[in-house]
Amino acid sequence: MNELLIIIAMVSLLLMMLNIRKNTLTIPTKAFLSTLLFSLALICFMSVYGILGGAICTVVGAMLAGLLTAVIAGKAPQLLG
Amino acid sequence: MNNKKTFTATRRRHLIACVLALITAVIMIPGMTTYLPFQMNEQILLPILLFPVIWTALFIYAYLAQKVWQPFVVMIALCVLHGLLSFWALTQGQG
Amino acid sequence: MKSITLKKLFLLHSWVGIITAVLLFVVAFSGALAVLSRPELKIWANPELQSSQHVASAQINRLVNEYHKQVPSEFGENIHVFLPSGHNFHLLTLVFESHDGDENYDQEVARVFQFHPDTLALENTYYGPSKEFYANKKTDAPTYIGEFHADLHLGRPIGLILTGFLGLTLLVSAVTGLFIHRKLIKELFTFRRDKGLDIAVSDAHKVIGIWGSVFNIVIGFTGSFLGLATVILLPAAAFVSFGGDQDKLIETFTAIPEPVVSHIKQPTKIDTILEHAHSRYPEAIIRDVTIMAHNDANAQVYLRLLGGEAVASQLLHYKGNGEFVQSMSSFGDISGVSIKVIELMFPLHFGNFAGVFVKLLWVLLGLSTALLPISGMMMWLAKRTRGSSPSLSVQAYARWNRFIIGSCGGLVLASFVLFPLQVVLNYTVIGVAQNSFFEPVFFYTWLAWLLSSVLPVGYKNYFKLTLLLCGASLALVLPLNIIFGVSNVINLNSSLVAIVDISFMVVGIACIFGALKIKNTQKLQAEVQPA
């Protein structure tokens, strides 16, 4: 169960980064989706590691997710016009 | 990049940043224990925790200040002030 | 922000980065490896730990009682039980200490009994000064790398001061780097692999710098604290209140009070206490147990725990009859906010508070921290070869590149070579005798590779060879363990050993594959791309 929660949390963080990267969404939409996904990751990590440990893991996981997204996917293609 | 245009008195800034900033930050630790309005363990532990922040701020300030005398004066003033506070506390038998 | 201020910050960032680049890489890379050193790699490195790291509480109680009867009474004042968890010794270790010495010694003296964690057979005994025992305990490859990260094996305090200062310079680099990167949000995901090496390196530096900034600031802050605390900070803080006596300060705050021996016999229920701690904190690991006034009515027992929900390590206090008293910071019963922050320094720096997944996060981010100074150096060098009148000649550029590969690549090679060496040593050399091998192999490998950088070879070929040798060193571990090891991927005596061996093989193959992808260059001049 713990492993599943960790996977869900990391996938949420990666999706959050892909969402932030996306050019086709408006800022309010990005903010809403990012908050949702970050909260999901936070809940999952806190269920596994407790409140403080979960918060630390979420922030660190988000850093790594952002880094991986940047290195693997790069910048989203710019929209024409 | 032309260093001469960016920084004035580069060597003096290096000395202030690398030597004086460290001395100031270290002298500030016992000095701060004399005036922080907390219980004893906080008075001792809080300056220790603040050391990296103080040193980093002084180090960067040594280079960013417009005139080289500014960080020099500030650090000397901090050293003297905290040194005197430590001296008075020691002579009064505080702690 | 004014452009002159940005220029100053940029120059400051460059100077600090260039001066500390190689050393920062050394400390960051060894730190990334050290995250996994305890307990995972320590268990891998010690066959005694591989079958089990758990000893039944009843057995621990029995051994303490049995061997307490064999030592003179003054050695029962303080009994330390180091559990074979992979954090301390590689054997279950019972240390009976007399603080005031005995008829042979005027200093703190210990009688030590060490047992195999699985069979509980007595493997080793020691009688002599406590300091010598702790100073000469058996080390292994991962522990050696961990200690190298802490003080570069330069001894204390010099080594600690150096690594502490590197933490401070990392703070400066991280803070100035954030200010000078004006398009922080816009270039959050900018990484252009296909635009040439210079652009890719520049983008990598910025992307790693942005995403790793919080991590780097935390590592720099906690690293400087851990390095400088005992050598500068504590003595300075103790200057006014304790006349500069750091030991007195530590004693005032952290001393565990000595119990008054009642001379009324009452069995100390070590097994009950251990079981209670396990059930109260099931996720935590008990590292060691301290028993004071053993088998007396006033006996006190302290357990040091690591991990679990508490994040920071904690000290559990029990009475000898098994009654739980309190849980406190591992530094002692100190109140306030500052101690809570200081407690967090260790888990935040080491990443050891919540299992392997969190450690992997720390390892990956630690490796990214190590790549920052390298990419920064490459950017600095590339800039100086550009333009109509570059400040760096073709030969100088090639020499710099070889120096970076020799120094930084040499460290990677020296670290990786220790792992197959560990497997061979486990087969050929017993116990503490292994200690004398790690230092010469590590430092001579590094030195040899650094010296080889003066040879006039193309730096791309040199880098390729470095990568090949690193990959080969790691890839050797699995086959060597199959031939020589007690546990390996064939017999699966230990799943951890199998996973570690396979991981080494995967990383080794990745290095070799990466090396083979680098195109050979014929001429030295052809390697420097014109502006």
Image (cartoon, coloured by chain):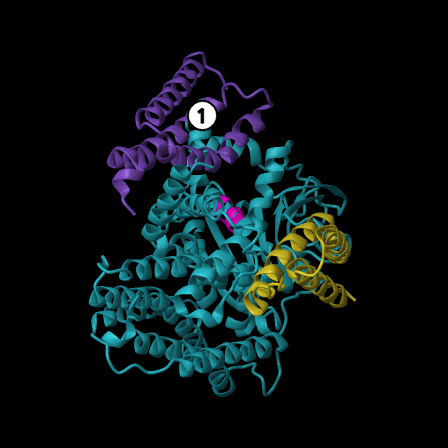
Chain colours: A yellow, B purple, C cyan
In the image, residue C497 sits, relative to residue C346, either above or below, namely below
Q: Position of residue C163 (x, y in %)?
A: 40, 49
Q: Residue C318 appears in which quarter of the rendering?
A: top right
Tell me the quarter of the image containing the C terminus of chain C: bottom left
Q: Position of residue C290 (x, y in %)?
A: 61, 48
For label 1, the SS is helix
Is residue B62 shown left or right of residue B94?
A: left
Q: Residue B36 appears in which quarter of the rendering?
A: top right
Provide the residue span drawn in magenta.
C216-221
Q: Say if the magenta span includes residue C218.
A: yes
Amino acid under label 1? Pro
Q: Residue C460 appears in which quarter of the rendering?
A: bottom left
Instruction: Mark 1: give few (<14), some (14-19) or many (20+) Cα within 10 Å.
Output: many
Residue B6 vs residue C520, the one in the foreground: B6
- Residue that badge 1 annotates: B30
Residue at (40% x, 22% y) in the render: B78
Visible in this render: residue C258?
no
